[in-house]
Image (cartoon, grey):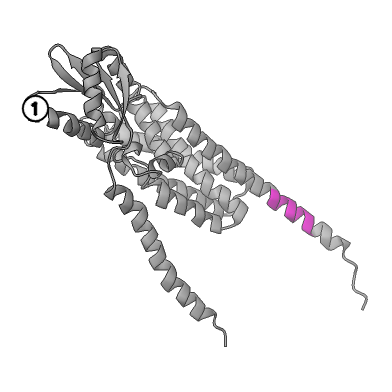
Amino acid sequence: MSHTPNRRLIAVVVLVPVLAALALWAFAWPAARTAPRDLPLGVAGPSAAADRLERELAGHEGAFEIHRYTDEAAARDAVEDRAVYGALVVTPQGPKLLTASAAGPAVAQLLQQAVTGPAAAQGTRVRTVDVVAAPESDPRGAALTASVLPLALAGIAAGAVVTLLGLRGTRAAAALLGASALVGVIAAGIAHSWLGVLTGDWWAEAAVLGLSSLAVSGAVAGLAALMGPAGIGVAAGVVMLLGNPFSGAASAPQMLPEPAGAIGQWLPPGAGTTLLRSVSYFDGAAATGPALTLAWWAALGLGAVLLGGALRSRRRAGTPAADAREPMAVG
């Protein structure tokens, strides 16, 4: 009697809890351990006063990575260039905190709590200026955060459909490019034109959204072309269980436990979110790194699709030739 059905039953019973535990770890662990870790923060003002502020901020061990600037203008430029998430400036009228809620409302709120709270306890009032504010239609960044999962799902679906429909080589690559371009246009139409949660150049945003989708769909279809249908599960698992929860979309990469934040920025969801923020709110500042990450994912994925198609064609071409060389059976 075959034991295959029993083995399959045991595999399902064991595999499902393992996957559930892995998903719970991937999503709950970063959320439960959210805290600043070497979060870039600027300090500006006269040397003596800036030194005092830096010593006070050093009391938050490992929380902030301090960058010194000569004056408020330099600190403001650093915030707008995404070199720091905020800056504490000493002025003749008192301390001033520069934030950028567009870079992450949760980070801006954390900075206000970390700086204004202790100052208020000492009887000092800290003025807060939101240098690059989040759009009024999405002040908490909820819509931007919510867009990470749909874009990832769209990429996974495109790569899986291309594979399951049997598209190979250049046809598969063309289908992925066309689907990603359409995803970018539709997503920009919804997020920018309808909801108003994106405020940058429309076509640049559409390009980022399309490239984010292509990075995922290319990885899914590329692995499937080289590994078979199992490649769909591998790529989808990486994107969903690592890329999505490690993206830092709800806060910032530096707010996630190590090395989750760094890993997330090397995966399409994290790089795509960072790039979209830069293009939509910061005029493209600090966009080079995440753009190259997405481009590499897309290029490697499409390359794998083309390579898999070429290998498949070569195997098909070799099979008839091998059959022709076989000696005819003598009856």
Q: Residue at x 41, y 46 (%)?
A: 243
Residue beneath disc 1: 122
Quarter of the image for the N terminus: give it.
bottom right
Residue 266 percent across, percent down from the top left: 46, 39
Q: Residue at x 25, y 40 (%)?
A: 142
Residue 78 percent across, percent down from the top left: 33, 20
Q: Is residue 114 visible?
A: yes
The part of the image, by quadrant, that contains residue 99 is top left
Residue 47 vertical placement versus 177 (above, below): above
Residue 310 vertical placement versus 41 (above, below): below
| Left/right of residue 142 with respect to residue 287 in the rendered view | left
The part of the image, by quadrant, that contains residue 206 is top left
Q: Residue at x 29, y 37 (%)?
A: 36
Q: What residue type is labelled 1?
A: Gln
Residue 196 versus residue 264: which sits nearer the camera?
A: 264
Residue 261 percent across, percent down from the top left: 38, 41
Residue 329 percent across, percent down from the top left: 90, 73
Residue 317 shown in magenta: yes
Point out the residue furthest to the right here. 330
Residue 73 versus residue 63: which sits nearer the camera?
A: 63
Mark 1 crowd level (few <14, some 14–19, many ≥20, 10 Å Cα) = few
Quarter of the image for the C terminus: give it.
bottom right
Q: What stretch is highlighted in magenta?
A: 311-319
| Left/right of residue 142 with respect to residue 14 in the rendered view | left
Q: Can residue 99 be seen in this view?
A: no
| Secondary structure type for disc 1 | loop
Residue 227 shown in magenta: no
